Amino acid sequence: MNDDRVEGNWKQFKGKIKEQWGKLTDDDLDVIAGKRDQLAGKIQERHGVARDEADRQIRDFESRNPDARWR
């Protein structure tokens, strides 16, 4: 998948990600920029959960949003 499609997809999912993880800021989402490992790190930081819990939450999000694409 080319970067343009990932970027467009990311813009679509930013709102859903903010709904799921409300403590993430717009600045956080700009830093994450569609990178799954960055998302997991910010979830850990903002929500105070362990890495495996952040990964589990992302997997749950992916199962509900099959069009989610990461870099």
Image (tube, rainbow, N blue to C red):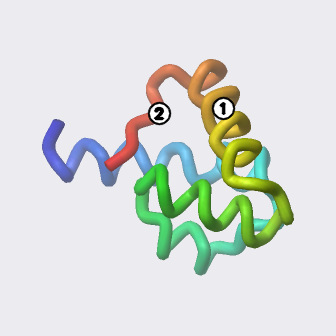
Q: Residue at x 77, y 45 (%)?
A: 20
Relative vertical location of residue 3 with respect to residue 26 in this rendering, above or below: above
Instruction: Report the amino acid beneath label 2.
Output: Ala
In the image: residue 15, left or right of residue 32: right
Residue pushed farthest left?
2
Mark closest to the chain's N terminus, 2 or 1: 1
The x and y percentages for residue 57 are 72, 38
Say if 64 sits above or below 58 in the image. Answer: above
Number of labels in the image equals: 2
Secondary structure of the residue carrying tag 2 is: loop
The reply, left or right, for residue 11 in relation to residue 18 is left
Residues 49 and 68: in front is: 49
Check the image and report above or below for 50 versus 45: above
Q: Quadrant of the N terminus?
A: top left
Q: Position of residue 56 (x, y in %)?
A: 69, 34
Q: Residue at x 42, y 63 (%)?
A: 33
Q: Secondary structure at mark 1?
A: helix
- Are the two marked residues, 2 and 1, in contact with CB atoms closer than 8 angstroms? yes
The percent coordinates of residue 62 (x first, y second) are 57, 28
Quarter of the view holding residue 58: top right
Category of crowding for the residue at label 1, using alpha-carbon neighbours closer than 10 angstroms: few (below 14), some (14–19), many (at least 20): some
Q: Which residue is mark 2?
A: 68
Q: How far apart are labels 2 and 1 at the CA level?
A: 8 Å
Marking on residue 1: none
Foreground residue, 64 or 49? 49
Residue under numbered circle 1: 61
Q: Amino acid at mark 1?
A: Phe
Point out the residue furthest to the bottom here.
27
Mark 2 is surrounded, within 10 Å at the Cα level, by few (under 14), some (14 to 19) or many (20 or more) other residues, namely some
